[in-house]
Image (cartoon, rainbow, N blue to C red):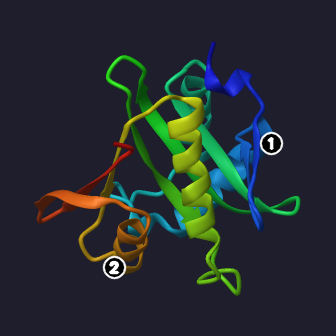
Amino acid sequence: MASADISLRIKGPRVALWSLEARDVEYLRTLRNKLRMFFADSRVVAPEGQTKWWEDYQKNPEDWTFVIRRGSVGIGIIAVYHVDPVERTACLGRLMIDDGPIRRKGYAQEAMGLAQAFARDVLGVLRVRLDVLPDNLPARSLYLKMGFVVVGTAPEMVTMEWSVV
């Protein structure tokens, strides 16, 4: 069963993670394009490319993408993906909080904690990896706060890991 076939709502004190649905795909594309400078592949995603991604996503049981919501309003995106139930590993990323007055309010930190708990408690993951651009210092600081440690560096990417044990 693909993750897109399951509707989840994970509630925190101020934000909730809602499973990505077809109605959210354009929001994801728009937000990704607005914040593309924070991605290794910073090309603009065209509607056709997003449609192809959505078609592939719906078939993939190893990818859990969530809209971060404050009330019923989407304020960002986060994903747990490349889930390997045998190795009990996953990647965490695609974390985006929309621009404006909602930034720097702790919503990303809360969403990150909810995603880590989901990976650990629901998916049984023991180790989570993520990649971040070296000059994205706010993101790196958040990841360190959330228990991630640097396990690799390269000029184009810093790899960080969080372990349950």
Give the spatial CA distance, label 1 vs label 2: 32 Å
Mark found first going from the N terminus, 1 or 2: 1
Type of amino acid under label 2: Leu
Which residue was labeled with disc 1? 23
* 126 w.r.t. 62: above or below: below
Q: Residues within 10 Å of mark 1 (few under 14, many from 20)?
A: few
Furthest toward the bottom, the residue is 101
Furthest toward the front, the residue is 165
Dividing the picture into quadrants, the one containing residue 2 is top right
> In the visual, does 43 lie left or right of 75?
left
At x 56% / y 68%, what residue is drawn? 109
Furthest toward the right, the residue is 72
Which residue was labeled with disc 2? 137
Furthest toward the left, the residue is 154
At x 62% / y 53%, what residue is drawn? 114
Dividing the picture into quadrants, the one containing residue 151 is bottom left
Visible residue check, residue 92: yes
Location of residue 157 in the rendering, given as x and y in whole percent from the top left corner: 21, 60
